[in-house]
Amino acid sequence: MKSLIFSHEASPDFFKTISKQLDGEIGDLVSHVFPDGESYIRINSECTDREAIIISNFHEPNSKFLPLIFLCETLKEMDIKSIMLVCPYLPYMRQDIQFRSGEGVTSRFFAKLMSQFIDSLITIDPHLHRYKSLDQIYNLKSKVLHANPYVASWVKTNIKRPIVIGPDSESEQWAASAAEIIGCPYIILKKVRKGDKEVLISPPNAREHNNLTPVLIDDIISTGRTMIATAEALKLEGFQAAVCIGVHAVFSGDAYSEMKKAYISKIITCNTVPHETNKIDLTRLLTEGIKLNSAK
């Protein structure tokens, strides 16, 4: 029988595009929230011995976690064979070490919980900084897809004479890979974070490249302060306003409005998190990843 495809907070257009490209059946799911805040769920599809594919928008995950677990547990009680979570943006990855005594390493806690309810996970460019792979914390089959070829294609099509700028060492894996695909130079800067909204960026010392268009590439745009500080550092060396590209459009608080005020010409993101800056479509990347993993 065909796989059942469910939406977990996915944007309607995103879900429609992916489900159309898959040889599956859209699951008949009824869910709502009672006035007291508790969730209700009912599945009207036949589930026995079928694979469930859940397309999820897991940005701002706390309110979305319980409804997902209720969906998974209901599927299991209806004798589903397996559950694949397609989660373009995987939350709770940045707290990957105990920076100060008493802190909870929430990436491990979240992974432990999720591993109890799903059988496989497909995601795009999770924040693997101190972890080498998701296998270090997730006890399930996982597949990590990479947005860089799509980001690089957008840059090649839309930016003349680019130079890729990585704001810090964590961004080097994305910046170096994109620059190689584009066929342009890249520079990695040094960052010192003073707090959630205070960031210092080392001068790039790259005046010989200031005739090129700086393209800042990172996996997540959260507070936006790193990109703002980087753009200002480039401005001091005579660069034109930067193009900022993020895989995941998290944009916490006033991040987006502050970035629009800064020395930045364009803000571009992939559609892993719904946002008005989504210009790079990754639905094809996801559907190809789903098909390959469903065939195994």
Image (cartoon, rainbow, N blue to C red):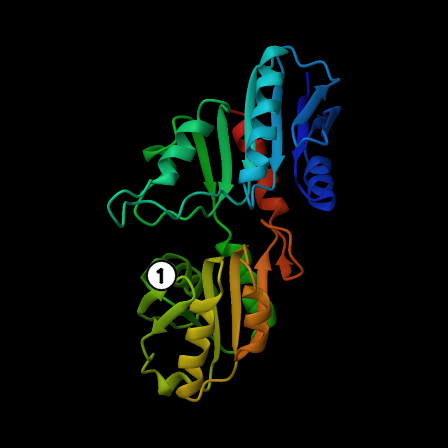
Q: Which residue is mark 1?
A: 172
Q: Is residue 215 above or below residue 31?
A: below
Residue 2 occupies quadrant: top right
Q: Nearer the viewer, residue 290 or 52?
A: 52
Q: Characterize the local packing of mark 1: few (<14), some (14-19) or many (20 or more) Cα atoms within 10 angstroms.
A: some
Q: From the viewer's perspective, tell me whether residue 53 is left or right of residue 25.
A: left
Type of residue at label 1? Answer: Glu
Q: Residue at x 36, y 87 (%)?
A: 208
Q: Is residue 106 above or below residue 274?
A: above
Q: Residue at x 41, y 58 (%)?
A: 174
Q: Secondary structure at mark 1?
A: helix
Q: Position of residue 31 (x, y in %)?
A: 72, 28
Q: Is residue 238 above or below residue 53?
A: below
Q: From the viewer's perspective, tell me whether residue 52 is left or right of residue 252.
A: right
Q: Position of residue 292 (x, y in %)?
A: 54, 32
Q: Is residue 14 above or below residue 172?
A: above
Q: Position of residue 190 (x, y in %)?
A: 30, 69
How many numbered dots are placed on residues in this image? 1
Q: Residue at x 39, y 68 (%)?
A: 167
Residue 168 occupies quadrant: bottom left
